[in-house]
Image: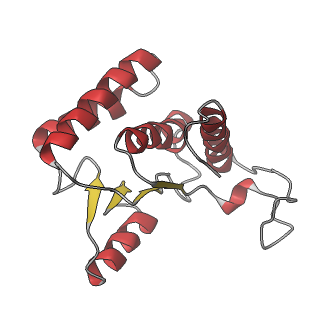
Amino acid sequence: MYLIFGGKGYVASNMIRYLSSNSKEYINISTDSIYLSKSLINILDQLISAIGFEDELFYTKLIDQFVELFCIEFEGANFNTALIPTGLCHRFLTNKNQMLKVNYYLPYLFTLISIKLKAKKIIFLSSAGVMSPLKQPITDQNLVYPLNNYTLTKYLCELRLENYFINRPDIESK
């Protein structure tokens, strides 16, 4: 089974369409998801609304509440992959605080939810714009060169996730 975060976006909506057409099971985790109860959506709304205003302990408490209720409602569900394509893709004129919220904080919180739900794989989709535009395809040798706030917030999230996994040797990551 797949966890898909933010099902309204381009990548997530196409992934949902693909999974549906191939009879694959998935759960869309978003504030307008038909799969989540009102209680789960309420916790998710609180989590998203508090981004940037509360401390780590507050988020941890809400994430724990979400995961506990989620496990009750989806008892026995095993998740192969969590897909986190969250981002304000190509909206360069978006308010910087909103961009930081969606491109930096939200993927991190969704990653924490995925880990607590014991997803076997977590895929965070960032942006090719984080890398130097001079070389394609992207390799490990490319320079990091964010050209705008969108790609900078995506890169900062990559660093945050990388730092999180470095400090968690119990979780295999790439």
Do we see residue 96 in this rendering? yes
Residue 158, image x, y percentages: 64, 44
Q: What's the image's color scheme? A: secondary structure
Residue at image location 50% in from the left, 51% down from the top:
87
Residue 36, image x, y percentages: 17, 49
Q: Which of 163 and 118 is in front in this view?
A: 118
Residue 161, image x, y percentages: 60, 39
Q: Which of 37 and 168 is in front in this view?
A: 168
Q: Is 130 placed above or below 53 here?
A: below
**Left or right: where 6 falls relative to 56:** left
> Which corner quadrant holds the N terminus?
bottom left
**Left or right: where 30 falls relative to 122:** left
How many marks are shown on the rendered structure? 0
**Residue furthest toward the front?**
170
Residue at image location 66% in from the left, 34% down from the top:
163
Residue 15, image x, y percentages: 39, 71
**Quadrant in the picture for residue 12:** bottom left
**Quadrant in the picture for residue 136:** bottom right
Do we see residue 7 in this rendering? no
Q: Which of 130 and 116 is in front in this view?
A: 116
**Left or right: where 69 falls relative to 119:** left
Q: Is 63 placed above or below 30 here?
A: above
Residue at image location 70% in from the left, 59% down from the top:
129
